[in-house]
Image (tube, rainbow, N blue to C red):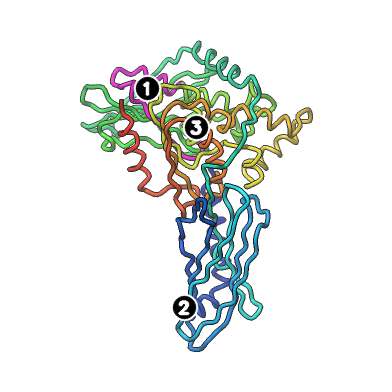
Amino acid sequence: MKKGCLCLLICFLSLSLFAQSNKEERRFAYKVKQTNDWVFYSPQNPTIQVIVANNQDEAAKLSLHLQVTTDDYKLLHQFSQAVSLNKGDSTEVDFSFSVPAPGFYRCSVFQDEDGIVNEIKKFNIGYEPTSIISLPDNKPDLKQFWDESLVKLAKIAPEYKLTLIPDSSTNIRKLYKVSMKSFGEVEISGYYCTPVKKGKYPAIIGYMGYGSKPWAPKANDNPGFVEFVLSVRGQSLQQPTNIYGDWITYGIQSKESFYYRGAFMDLVRAIDFIASRSEVDTKNIFAEGGSQGGAFTLAACALDHRIAAAAPYIPFLSDYPDYFKIVHWPGDVLKAALAKQPLMTETQLYEMLSYFDIKNLAGWIKCPVIMGVGLQDEVCPPHTNFSGYNRISTEKEYHIFPTYGHDVPPSWWITRMDFFKKHMN
């Protein structure tokens, strides 16, 4: 998901802010408290609490300002509070306010001293995320389209081929590279890790992020599980022979030719492969993935009910109309591609995308789901994460990580494994 570009942008912004406010930070120290982990629930109003300390050898005055906008930058509130501090003193300044609806909001805290304004911190907060309403916009033939796609996939002989990778195998688990045929006779591949000791094992399918580099399960990790990390068409292991360009724009002229039709079928083919293995306990097939992999996880659960439980995090590809209002990528890329399709309108583009919108597929999911969310995510904004999640009607839970962007903390891997073990049959 273009993490390198995102990291460079964050570094640039951080350096710019430091250069602007370095002088003021020596005079005053600030801490924005993570009240309620910055996620609020009715009847409580959102409250932003800022601790200000005067580091000077004399009394000083300043003003603190808070600006609140929607996640698509529509201004909601602007507040100011005057602060007077004696030498070495500190105080807490509280801003409490209402928001018009469940959702995610942008907060920016500024300092004003003698007419010089500097930004102290900007961050996102949430309010009643599970009450966010993103109405489905699917066409009546959505299910028919995917049923027909699944029928076509089933007619393709998978021709599974496993090649042992001795240098990455141990006496605990063996690692294989696997290739198979998928929708449209396209070859896809992945890494398959299986315990050496004979038996029936639960399996975890890992779906990968947009343009992720190839990676394989480690032979000494998760010894009681089979693991398969899939590379969908044109990505990861297939990227050297990629014919799909910037995947998200490939074939946008129709739902039949769009890249994600074949990619979603690759997800099902991965389940076919796992279910074909004699060492797999087919009642305990789990799925996980982040970003595009999070979307893949949810799509796989919607299209194939052999998955026992799923753990998507920071999921992509949901609620396109709102998504493109909040962040520039991938909306700008798709709209640029649309300009090269003279017979296709923006309305028709959104209609086509509706067939691949996780929001529209999520209602088909029948297994338990746990979701991880980065509250500061500017790649797959949390609003879009919950657009799909809120339409899941099975057992589910979510974990919002207040300081994380397009990522989750190390604790997530323990949490999701506990969730899988809880739901073993």
Q: Is residue 211 visible?
A: no
Could you tell me how far apart the alpha carbons at marks 3 and 1 are, in whole angstroms? 25 Å
Q: Is residue 274 magenta?
A: yes
- Crowding at dot 2, Cα within 10 Å, few <14 / some 14-19 / many 20+, comes out as some
- Quadrant for the C terminus in the image: top left
Q: Are marks 3 and 1 in contact (CB under 8 Å)?
A: no
Q: Which residue is mark 3?
A: 392
Residue 388 pos. (x, y %): 54, 35
Question: Mark 2 belongs to which amino acid?
Answer: Ser
- Number of disc labels: 3
Residue situated in front as seen by the camera: 161 or 363: 363
Question: Where 311 falls versus 325 (above or below)?
Answer: above
Residue situated in front as seen by the camera: 151 or 2: 151
Residue 191 pos. (x, y %): 38, 30
Q: Is residue 291 magenta?
A: yes
Question: Where 24 falls versus 320 (above or below)?
Answer: below
Q: Which residue is mark 2?
A: 90
Range drawn in magenta: 269-292
Of circles 1 and 2, the one toward us is 2
- Crowding at dot 3, Cα within 10 Å, few <14 / some 14-19 / many 20+, comes out as many
What residue is rendered at 60% in x and 18% in y? 145
Q: Which residue is mark 1?
A: 274
